[in-house]
Image: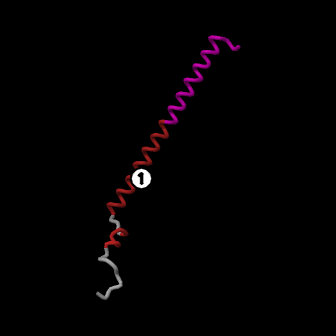
Amino acid sequence: MGGDRKGNGDSYLFLKMNLDDIKTGLASVIGLGNWMVEIDLMLKVSISTASLVYIILKIRALLKNGSK
């Protein structure tokens, strides 16, 4: 009756967020960021270790066989 509004205001609830929702969203983003940083660090360390092992093995092979 006599209203320009449609429905009972349920669409307004989607726009309204409380503080706990915002905190949860930020914690999720920060947690995912920390997890990605740890993966990045582990990846860098593993690549560096693999490179060091390769260089050591190559030097041992050259010393054993001589530079041909």
In the displayed structure, would residue 34 be above or below residue 21? above
In the displayed structure image, the side of residue 50 where residue 23 appears, left or right: left
Residue drawn at x 33%, y 70% is 13
Q: Nearer the viewer, residue 36 or 9?
A: 9
In the displayed structure, would residue 14 be above or below residue 36? below
x%, y% of residue 11? Answer: 35, 72
Q: Nearer the viewer, residue 64 or 11?
A: 11
Q: Main secondary structure of the magenta part?
A: helix
x%, y% of residue 22? Answer: 36, 61
Marks counted in the figure total 1
Residue drawn at x 40%, y 48% is 31
In the displayed structure image, the side of residue 15 where residue 66 appears, left or right: right
Residue drawn at x 34%, y 79% is 6
In the displayed structure, would residue 47 be above or below residue 28? above
What is the quadrant of residue 20 in the picture?
A: bottom left
Q: Amino acid at mark 1?
A: Val
Give the structural element (helix, strand or loop) at label 1. Answer: helix
Name the quarter where the C terminus is drawn: top right
* Magenta residue check for 66: yes
In the displayed structure image, the side of residue 2 where residue 61 appears, left or right: right
Name the quarter where the N terminus is drawn: bottom left
Q: Nearer the viewer, residue 3 or 15?
A: 3
**Segment tinted magenta in the rendering:** 43-68
Residue drawn at x 55%, y 23% is 53
x%, y% of residue 39? Answer: 46, 40
The residue that disc 1 covers is: 29
* Magenta residue check for 56: yes
x%, y% of residue 61? Answer: 61, 15
Q: Nearer the viewer, residue 23 or 10?
A: 10
User: How would you rate the neighbour count of disc 1 (Cα within 10 Å): few for under 14, some for 14-19, many for 20 or more?
Assistant: few
In the displayed structure, would residue 57 be above or below residue 14? above
